Every structure is written in C-alpha cells, then in structure tokens.
Amino acid sequence: MSSQLPPIDPNIRGHLARRSAGRLPDGLLAEVSAALDEARDTRPGAQWPRPAWSIPRLAGAGATVALVAVLVLAVAIPALHTAPATSPASYPDGRALSTIELASLMAGPALPMNTTVVASATIDARTDVCPMDRYPTLGVVEGMASQVCVMGATVPVGLGAPKTTGVFAFRYLGPGYLGLLGEITPASTGLAFKVADEWPLAGKTFLVEGWLGVVELTESCASAPTAGDVLDPNGEDCPYADWLADEPVDASVAAQTGLGSSETAGSGSPLLPVPERHVEAGGVHQIDSVPRSVGGTYGVYVVRSVTEQCPYASPQENRGCGAWRVLARVADISIPELRASPALTPTPTTAPPATPVAAPTQARPIAPTGLIGPGNRPLTAAEVSALVAADPGHLVGRYVIDKRPWCQTTCEDFEVEVADRVTPGWTVGQGEQGELLNSGPDGMVWTVPQVLAAWPNRPGIYLVDAWISGASMDSCDVAGSPCYEVSWLGSTPGVQQLGLQLGAYHEFGAGQVGGGASIHGLFLVEIFPEIQACGTGPASSGGACAAAGKMAARLEPAVLP
Amino acid sequence: MERALVERARSGDRAAFDSLVRSRIDAVYRTSLAILGNQADAADATQEAFVSAWCHRDALRDPDAFDAWLGRINLNACRQHLRRRARTRVREISLDDPEGDREAAATDRPLDDRTADADVFDRAFARLSIDDRAVLVLHHLHERPVAEIAATLAAPEGTIKSRLHRARAALESALAKESR
C-alpha cells in the first residue's frame, strides 16, 4: 500500500508547536524518578497520581464532604422509616464471587452488556493482549477456563504489580472482556459498607449496601447530564440530588408530604432517612437503569471517593472538592453452576478471548487473502480464535472480517464488523484495518453503484460484491517509481466503474492487466476521500491512472475447524 | 549502543532505564502537551507513561521498537487523562455528520485564517479523539515516518494515510463549528 502521506501543513504544525512549546516543568524528571522508585518498591499505585496534584486536593476533601452532607440535610425532607425491604439473594449481598464462580460465569452464556459483578480474582498485568479501541488493556484474569481480559478506563490504583490479587468490581463488556471499576476496599465488618459506616477516602473504591434515592431540586439545568463512560460514569444528575441511606423512604408518605421535592426544603425539617449521604449518581441511574425513586432503590452499589472541581470555583483553583461517586449497581444475578473440572489458566494470547485454547493440529494450507464467515457474515471472535489456535500460521498476513468489541465513543455500538489483518506475534486485532461501512441497517456488502453513490463523502472500508477486470493501461509513472496499475470493479463482467490501485487484478483476478476474464468476488476495498493520482509522477503524465480506492483482499468463506 | 541500553533496561537495570528517561522525557512531555494542551496533565501523563513502561518492560519484544512502544504507552496515558478530565467537554467528531462530510471534502486545502486564532484551534483540537490528535501530532509536528506512526498507533501502515485524512477532516469540521 502507498505510504505517501499528505504534506506537512504549516498552519497545523505552527499551532501544535505553540501548544507544545515551553520548558520542561521543573522537577518533572525528579518526580518521574521518585515514581519509578515507588514502583520498584512494589507499592503499586503509589505512583499515581503525582504527589503535587493529589495532596492539596485530598486535604480539602474531608471538609467538603462534611459541607455537602450538611447542605443536603438542609434541603432534604423528614425522615420516614419503613419496614426493611425483602431480602435480596445471597449474592451480591455480603460476598464476592469466587474465582471459580467467575470462570463459570464467563464461560457461560453472554451476560447483558454492562452487567456489574464483584469477584475475587488475580489479575495478571499485561498490556500486550486483548486489543480494544475504547480501553487500554490492564491484564488478564487468572484461573479462567478461557482468556478473560481486563480493560480499564482510568488509572487503576493498585494494579502496578505483575499480579494483583483482590476483590474487584467489573463490568461485563462482552465475551471474554471485563471492564475494571476498581479494586474493592472492604469494610471492617464485611465486604460492603453501611451508610452509617466511615467510608474510605483518597480515591478508594468500595461497596455500599443500601437504598439509592433522589430529591428533585427546583434549579434549572443548563443541559441534560450525560451518563459518561460505563467504567467512569458522570456524577451530575441535575435537577436531582442523589442520596444513599441504610433504610428506604415510604413512597406513599413521601407523596403526601411532598417528599422528593425541594419545595419542602425550606420546611426546616430533616428530609432524608438517617443516616444518609449525598452521592453523585447521575450516570449510574442511566447506565444501570436505576430508577430515580423518591423512596430509594435497594442495591449493592459500587462507590468511589473522588476529588473534583468545587462548585463555583474558578478553573485555576486546584484544590478540589471531595465527593462520593456511585459507579455501578452490582447485578443481582444467579450464581453460575460450578463446573466439575477446575478452571484452567490459559497462556495469555493476543487472540480474542473467551475461546477455548485448542491443541495445535496439522498445519492448514495458507488461507486466501481474506476470510469471511459462511453466508457472508462476519466471523465471531470465537471462530477467529479457533482458526488461529488451530494453526497460528494459517492466517498470518490475511484479512479477516470479524465482529468484536469496538467502543470508540459509546458501547452502544458494541459489536461491529471489523476488517482485521492477522500479523505474527500480535495475531488478531492489533493490525486492525478499520470498521466496515454498512450498506444498510443489516447489511455490510455493497454493490458498485452503492459505493459510487456514497463516494466521495464516505471514505472508508467497504466490502464490495463485484466483478474485477484489468485496465488497458498499466503504466502511469514516467519517473520510474513503482506504478500503481489500475484494476476495475464493475457490476457486470468487463464494466469499468470503480478504479482501484495496486494492480489488484494481478493478485485477485485471472491474468495480466488488460487481458483475461473478469472475476466475480467479494472484495475488501479502501475508498479514498478523493480520487488519487497513481504513482509518484505527475498524474497527467501517465494517463488514466486516477483511482478511487485500493484493494486489500478478495474474501472467501472460512473453512472453520 | 541504544539497543544495548534498552535491553539492559528491559532486564531490570534501573540505571539504564533512567538514562532512557532522561533522553526521552522532553519528547514524551511535548507530545503529551501537544495532545492534551495542559501542562499539568501533560506532566502527569509523562510520569505515568514512564512508570507504566518500567512496570511492563517485559512486554517490550523488540528493543529496536522501544520508541514506538513508549509512544504507544504515552498515548494510553494521554487517553486516560482525557477520560479523567472534563468528560463532557471532550466530544468525538462523527464523520457521518453531513455537515462534517462537506467540510471533509476540502481537507487537502491548507487551513485558512480560521486557525489564526489560537483559542479557536485549541477548542477545535479538544473536540478530536485521542487517536486523531495523535496522528496529527506525529505527522504534522514531529514528522515521524509512516512506519513509526503506524507502530505508535498500533495500526497497519496502509491505514495511516486514511487516518490522517479522517483526522484532518475532523479538525476542519471542529474548526468550522468553533469559528461560528
């Protein structure tokens, strides 16, 4: 493929140079050295964040938390105690899943996306496995029957060691993928804290068993708060104030008294169940569908002490205020049936996880240049992994069309079709070609007219069902540099509609350019945003060499092991 | 010599790693600063990148690829900082936006006077995804060869050109929005 890049834009360069100008901060080298010392002293996590940043913020956190609590009490409604709710299941109350239970869970049917679980586990810190565009890889969970990768949205305090054992809160991101919410700091009396307990500070993540409710405020909101990232949800919940309490509020009494509205805030009466704490839970209401209930919704909640910009503080104010951010509600799921055989610990690989590690078999023939699933469907991660496991060399250098996590902006588009190039060492995923453009709500295969209609406003990766043929002119560069011969895709044999670089006809067709029969196939094509002249010489010197795209592969159905 | 230093660092020689830190901290910091646009965040990301590199040094397979490997780690550190900082302020630019499409069609033109305003540029740049920022910084500022950009972004070389186009189009679109 062409490696010629666009020319340097002096304006962009100037602005980027301006942004990166200035001296290296005094003491940064020393701070890095100190952080490395801490890392070497096996105190994982101690290196984050930089001391100069964290200390002043944490210093103000306690006082701010107290202030927030007082303010909430001042605007809340009378405490209305009710009978305890029905007892939930034994999990997640009081304990975490064992590693074996987690292994069974991950080996079983797919869970609903974003399901939160708490489990005892050992995370083997690895950054070279399980590529995912949305999150960096933190490691793999040991003791799983198949590879389970741990991804993270934030700097994971406590995961600096090669292996970290503890109780962790995870969100299920897909088969073989868990997102780390945090390592759980247990209470002195059990795993989960009560609201009345003293909660951890300093960025700790912990569980709170109780009732999450809201008070509706009368303030106007500049805009509707967003949920944020599923592993790092937003806290803002305007126009509501959120609380956690050890007991619920009786909704019927609340309705009679106006509980839940800040109209009662001026009554001077204590508003909420006692004890209660003001928390930030806007994101979790949306992500976990926790209703905004005046009376409260029972659950075991994952909470983190956070430091954030103080209300009404200027952006330059660096001290920060402390708050309790609810990250997730632990799902009330059935504990999976334990397998008869103990969980295995597969060797971490870069292949997509959640696929049994198969014993190598007899070498398979080199695959065609590209593979797709039967019936022109994308291969599943398990199928690709099985192909790789059956023979690691079988797919090297080949493209596969697979369906796997790709959460660039939101995990709503959790699975899409992706063209991956399989490379040695990295196997699947690191060499991803890109997301495929869909031809419709359910389709990923384009016709040539569809591509031409979309071009040039939709450059990208296409699967095109077409006939390929060669051009009559196969040279376009008078300067002697390698010339990109033109091949053509058309809706019918011999029709030249879509010009392609790379002499694709040589590789994927049936003969020399300008001769031979047209070949029908399913082609993986990158469409340029604009027509590009071929080669390095003047476009006009070589004649009709302008191309709208280049060919990556001709796809054939995979023969699954 | 450089390769030997990297190999010593990979085997746990802290002095060798310190030497690598000294020789690269300026470049790592400036890349972080160009991407993040904030000195404190850039310093944090720089520190985290080196600590992460040290903690995961055994994951480096090819000593000759140390710089690209470190660059990839640094990008991850920047990505994490973007997540922590102003979650709602950072928005991704959808190239499916018809408005953006029209603007994207002109991506080979030099940026015009709209970019004369540094504040407009910075706000527009803050709208880009981390990968878009990175590919623009690596190409237009550092003029890295395509192979190194590809290694840093963990992407095949053949996609860098299209990634640059996409990033440029996103920047154009963001500039148009910020200029209104």
Image (spheres, coloured by chain):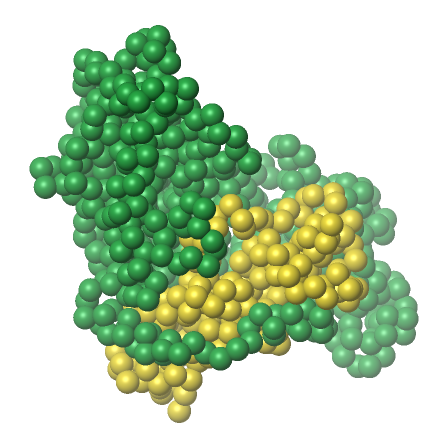
Chain colours: A green, B yellow
Comparing B65 with A466, the one in front is B65
Q: Residue at x 57, y 48 (%)?
A: B91
All told, the count of numbered labels is 0
Q: Residue at x 38, y 44 (%)?
A: A231
Comparing B129 with A553, the one in front is B129
Comparing A191 with A100, the one in front is A191
Where residue B71 sits in the image (x, y, percent)?
A: 47, 70
Where residue A139 sits in the image (x, y, percent)?
A: 31, 55
| Image quadrant in which the C terminus of chain A is located | top left
A221 sits to left or right of A37 = right
Examine the rendering and report whether any part of residue A508 can be seen: no
A497 sits to left or right of B100 = right
Examine the rendering and report whether any part of residue B121 can be seen: yes
Q: Measured along the vertical axis of the image, is residue A258 above or below residue A56?
A: above
Q: On the image, which quarter does residue A255 sit in?
A: top left
Q: Residue at x 28, y 71 (%)?
A: A35
| Image quadrant in which the N terminus of chain A is located | bottom right
Q: Measured along the vertical axis of the image, is residue A9 above or below residue A265?
A: below
Q: Measured along the vertical axis of the image, is residue A196 above or below residue A426?
A: above
Comparing A317 with A326, the one in front is A317
Q: Residue at x 18, y 52 (%)?
A: A165
Where residue A379 sits in the image (x, y, percent)?
A: 51, 43
Where residue B92 sits in the image (x, y, percent)?
A: 58, 49
